[in-house]
Image: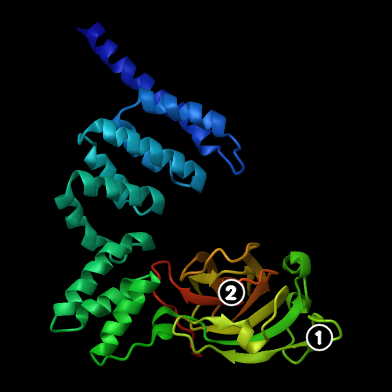
Amino acid sequence: MKTLLLSLLLPLAASAADISSHLAPLLAVGPEGKGNAEAAAAWKKLVDGADASAIPDLLKAMNGAGELSANWLRGAVSSLEQRGAGKLPLDDIKAVATDTKNSPAGRTLAFDLIRRADKAQWDALVPGLLLDPAAELRREPVSRLLEQGKTSTTTAPLRQALEAARDEDQIKAAAEALRERGEVVDLPKHFGFLMDWQLIGPFDNRKRAGYETAYHPEIKVDLTASYDGREVTAGEKTVAKWVPYTSSSQFGMIDFNKAVGMYKEVTGYAYTVFNSPEERDAEVRLGCKNAWKLWVNGQPVFGRDEYHRGAQIDQYRYPVKLKKGPNTILVKCCQNEQTETWTVEWEFQLRICDATGTAVLASNR
């Protein structure tokens, strides 16, 4: 009997070890085909040798995985789900889905598995996702509240939807429905968009060199200073000087074209001071389709040297430590050489909030 028991357990232990060994090549894939051959071989061995019981481990493997690696893992999960024929380890999958420490990608896939396998269980879980830290998981409960708001005798469901929504279409839908009911909606204040800035430009960005060039505002912000700007056409001199700009966009868009001018191959800076009522942890959330860099209190936070990949609310999120009192924020925004109509925008939006997306408002707002 003991020998028989060992013979039944050993294949399971070997299977678990095999899964672990096959994950490394999947997590090592990189751009331009790096590691694809090794990943393909490992993926086949994993899918051929594992069963649906491996799905929770594959979901957790998405924690910290790049998008290419996540695609390999999604494919493996899909194959094992089909092989499972409805016999999935739903309790373990649910544990992954509801643990907010796991990656949004893995959790979203876990909830999709639950929805397909047990719709009633998924329906029961959806309301709990309304204020989930993963914005993509809020969409379904917000959608339900928007529908409820159409027939509700109060505006409470619409207010809840607006509070939780992070996708622009749902935010607009909630705001419009509330306004139709005679409610006042101040979206910039609701989400904590910073509306008042000082802008300066145009500095040079020909050959996209401006992103790495430290112009004067990166060295010292002097709101009284002016500098030679980029010569945008032969013989046309420009002067880069700070100008005040207050956004009129309900999503807090800061538009360099309106403040500085309609230019291409240029760099601009935006500066503001956020007065925090207390020392606290917060998040800076930024949306931008241009190349950009961000500094808070003179310290670099992050940047993206890419252009016109689209912009959306909370596109980029970074934790910061706010001091009590004034905190300086500097944004660098570069416009490239493309001239298509969809490349005209030279703008960004930025808000301050906590980790749940609830606005943190300045004491001087």
Is residue 316 visible from the viewing direction of this image? yes
Query: Which residue in the structure is indicated by mark 2?
Result: 341
Residue at the right extreme of this rendering: 235
Q: How is the image coloured?
A: rainbow
Specify few, some or many for label 1: CA neighbours under 10 Å numbering under 14, 14-19, or 20 or more. some
Is the residue 262 above or below the residue 46 in the image? below
Q: Position of residue 232 (x, y in %)?
A: 78, 80
Q: Position of residue 290 (x, y in %)?
A: 61, 69
Residue sitting at 34 percent across and 26 percent down?
A: 50
Give the tally of numbered discs.
2
* Of 192 and 167, the residue lying toward us: 167
> Does residue 288 appear to the left or right of 22 in the view shown?
right
Q: Which mark is residue 227?
A: 1
Counting residues from the start of the chain, the first of labels 1 and 2 encountered is 1
Residue sitting at 31 percent across and 84 percent down?
A: 176
**Eye-nearest disc, 1 or 2:** 2
Type of amino acid at the residue the image marks with label 2: Thr
Q: Residue 123, located in which quarter of the rendered image?
A: bottom left
Q: Position of residue 31 (x, y in %)?
A: 60, 44
> Does residue 187 appear to the left or right of 94 in the view shown?
right
Q: Residue 347, located in which quarter of the rendered image?
A: bottom right
Structural distance between the alpha carbons of marks 1 and 2: 29 Å
